[in-house]
Image (cartoon, rainbow, N blue to C red):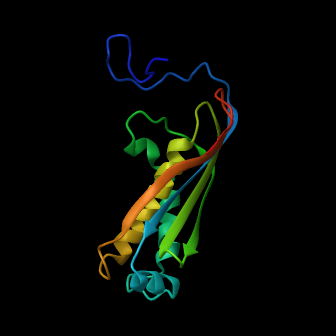
């Protein structure tokens, strides 16, 4: 299979999806940020001076998902019909897991929007907590699942 973001001369292009059917498409992605015990407790107890870290990161992640086409050059502008961002605190590893789920009715998938939402949320946690400790590590960012579209369902 060839790369679809290049024409026959090797020029970059956005894929033409005009002939594709409009279907419901949904994707979820997750990622984690490992923080110090001090940062973990401060986030958990809402003691970070910049404010409620998880609430701000939740809004930032949703906003990030909505802005994906402005950040990733070949992504189509999508009208999201749903976007959510949830967190799970993992005290045994001092990690915060973020999960972003997005949905649209459109001609192309929303995997990049879910991944961008997670990444934006984790970056926001870093930004809000860096005054306490800059040694945070973000990682394990990946697509959990996607549904709809010509390629069908995917589950990690």
**Relative image position of residue 132 (x, y in whole percent):** 32, 82
Q: Is residue 66 visible?
A: no
24 sits to left or right of 49: right
**Residue at the extreme top:** 8
Q: Residue at x 42, y 58 (%)?
A: 139
**Relative image position of residue 85 (x, y in whole percent):** 58, 62
Q: How many marks?
A: 0
Q: Residue at x 48, y 68 (%)?
A: 57
**Relative image position of residue 81 (x, y in whole percent):** 65, 48
**Relative image position of residue 41 (x, y in whole percent):** 47, 86
Q: Residue at x 40, y 67 (%)?
A: 124
Q: Is residue 10 visible?
A: yes
- Name the foreground residue: 45 vs 95: 95
Q: Residue 88 occupies which quadrant of the picture?
A: bottom right
| Quarter in which the C terminus is drawn | top right
In the image, residue 104 sits, relative to residue 92, either above or below, namely: above
In the image, residue 119 sits, relative to residue 79, either above or below, namely: below
Q: Residue 148 occupies which quadrant of the picture?
A: top right
In the image, residue 96 sits, relative to residue 99, either above or below, namely: below
148 sits to left or right of 139: right
In the image, residue 118 sits, relative to residue 95, either above or below, namely: above
**Residue at the extreme front:** 92
Q: Residue 125 occupies which quadrant of the picture?
A: bottom left
């Amino acid at each position: 299979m060839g790369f679809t973001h290049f024409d026959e001369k090797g020029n970059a292009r956005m894929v033409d999806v005009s002939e594709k059917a409009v279907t419901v498409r949904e994707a979820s992605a997750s990622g984690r940020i490992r923080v110090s015990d001090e940062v973990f407790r401060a986030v958990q107890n809402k003691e970070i001076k910049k404010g409620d870290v998880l609430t701000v990161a939740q809004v930032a992640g949703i906003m990030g998902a909505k802005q994906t086409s402005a950040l990733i050059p070949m992504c189509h502008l999508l009208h999201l019909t749903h976007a959510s961002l949830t967190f799970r605190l993992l005290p045994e590893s001092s990690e915060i897991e973020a999960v972003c789920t997005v949905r649209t009715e459109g001609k192309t998938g929303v995997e990049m929007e879910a991944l961008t939402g997670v990444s934006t949320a984790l970056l926001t946690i870093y930004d809000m907590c860096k005054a306490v400790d800059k040694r945070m590590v973000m990682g394990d960012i990946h697509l959990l699942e996607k549904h709809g579209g010509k390629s069908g369902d995917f589950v990690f």
